[in-house]
Image: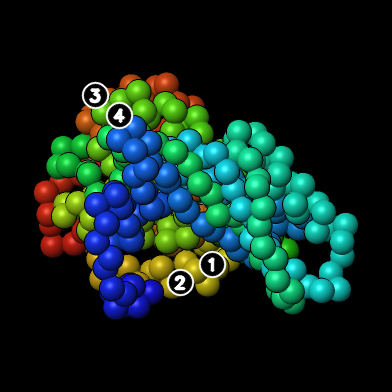
Amino acid sequence: MDQVLGCLPRVEDENVLVGFDTADDAGVYRLTPECALVQTVDFFTPIVDDPHTFGAIAAANSLSDVYAMGGRPITALSILAYPAKGDLADLKAILRGGAAKMHEAGCVIIGGHSVSDDEIKFGYAVTGTINPDAVITNSGARPGDDLVFTKRIGTGVVSTALKRGIAREEDVRAAVESMLLLNREACERMLAFDVHACTDITGFGLIGHAREMAAAAAVSLEIEAEQVRFLPGAVEYASQGALPGGLRNNREFCAGSVEVLRDLPAGIEDLLYDPQTSGGLLIALPPEHACLLERRLNGARRIGRVTGPQATPVRIL
């Protein structure tokens, strides 16, 4: 995709505050000196068995990009692919689950589009608002910043373990709770501090999104593996080989940009590449502010720091 996007012509528009050049979470377009739109889209195939829960997770995941930019989601358009002869009760449950989560976020669904497809896919295009002077991107990290991460990792591995029939119910329940948790509070809490950069950790995994942040800011990120928290059962399932295809793709794509400086226990390194659904926010901010954010936001943890450019953009300590 990087190669394809590099071939697209750049259209000059002074109101485009954030485009696709830095692989940021969402696009930002200025309407007035006081108001800009934050726009994003995301959809995927079912990752849990319950259709209502799937719809709600898809909504939380779609909203996350707006929160990562520091914005407030206001409207959404649904995107649906569903079998022509599929169960209508399941379809209603998916849509109701998504609508409930959007309502929780204070975001209004104003329409959408559907197509007939044998493989179910669901998500949203979300629009938010933000002051143009308050946009948080993934490109502002500065040497000396600390890195705060707001959720546990392992949704991809736990989902794969579920599909293989080896996941314990309580572990699946913990992963679902994490995916259903909106990043709204994390966004609101971080806005009280001098945040230099932020990105949400989703399909490219912690290392993949850390690599994007490092590249966008021309810095390096050091991540302390011992400080990263994992979902219950995730390390065990990873060590048993319950690795999603996206994890392997992330590792293959990012391996040349990562240096692992210590021996890691079985499964830990794999999980750093694990593709997340509705993952947490990775935030770069001054150490004194990082300490306060860690105290004030339940689940937040300092996991590393930003340094000047190194031979590799991401270093695992």
Residue in front for this viewpoint, 36 or 134:
36
Where does label 4 land, which residue? 290
Give amino acid for label 1: Leu
Q: Which mark is residue 243?
A: 1
Give amino acid for label 2: Arg
Q: Dot 1: within a 10 Å radius of its alpha carbon, few (fewer than 14), some, or many (20 or more) residues?
A: many
Looking at the image, do the residues carrying marks 1 and 2 touch, with CB atoms under 8 Å apart? yes
The answer to whether 196 appears left or right of 77 in the picture is left
Horizontal and vertical percent position of residue 171: 65, 47
- For residue 51, above or below residue 115: above
3D distance between C-alphas at marks 1 and 4: 32 Å
Mark 4 element type? helix
Where does label 2 land, which residue? 248
The answer to whether 261 appears left or right of 25 in the picture is left
3D distance between C-alphas at marks 3 and 4: 5 Å
Horizontal and vertical percent position of residue 137: 30, 46
Residue appearing at x 38%, y 74% in the figure: 1
Mark 2 element type? helix
Mark 3 element type? helix
The answer to whether 20 appears left or right of 215 in the picture is right
Q: Dot 4: within a 10 Å radius of its alpha carbon, few (fewer than 14), some, or many (20 or more) residues?
A: many
First along the sequence among labels 2 and 3? 2
Looking at the image, do the residues carrying marks 3 and 4 touch, with CB atoms under 8 Å apart? yes
Give amino acid for label 3: Glu
Mark in front: 2 vs 3: 3
3D distance between C-alphas at marks 2 and 3: 36 Å
First along the sequence among labels 2 and 4? 2
Instruction: Tell me which corner region of the image, top left, top right, bottom left or bottom right, holds residue 212.
Output: bottom left
Q: Which mark is residue 288?
A: 3
First along the sequence among labels 1 and 2? 1
